[in-house]
Amino acid sequence: MIFLLCYGWGNPFIYPVVDWSKPEQTMVVITLTALFLALMHVLTVGIATGRDAIAKRRLALTTGVYNDAFTP
């Protein structure tokens, strides 16, 4: 409804790159968007995996260390 109030009733599409009267251009845009989304997902999973590996290594270094700082 907001789009119609801002841009009017005569436009068959919201974004020119997703104009289905030009299916080749639209499919290229959709394919590139899907590939970019998949790449960003793989990058995010890689960063999270690296973060977890670093945390696991740091926690392994302090495991079993006795701390008697609060003993009177």
Image (cartoon, rainbow, N blue to C red):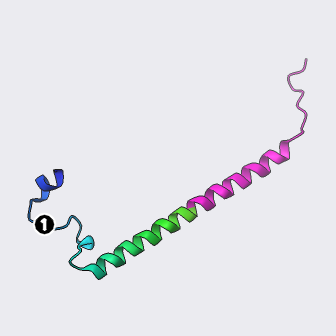
At a point 43% along the width and 69% down the height, the residue shown is 34
Quarter of the image for the C terminus: give it. top right
Q: Is residue 32 left or right of residue 22?
A: right
Residue 58 coordinates in the image, percent (x, y): 78, 48
Callout 1 secondary element: loop
Q: Indicate the amino acid at tag 1.
A: Asn
61 relative to 44, above or below: above
Looking at the picture, tell me which residue is in the foreground, 61 or 13: 13
Residue 55 coordinates in the image, percent (x, y): 73, 49
Residue 29 coordinates in the image, percent (x, y): 35, 74
At a point 9% along the width and 59% down the height, the residue shown is 8
Q: Residue furthest top?
A: 72
Q: Main secondary structure of the magenta part?
A: helix
At a point 24% along the width and 74% down the height, the residue shown is 20
| Residue labelled with disc 1 | 11
Residue 49, magenta (yes or no): yes
Residue 47, magenta (yes or no): yes
The image quadrant that residue 65 belongs to is top right
Q: Which residues are magenta?
A: 44-72
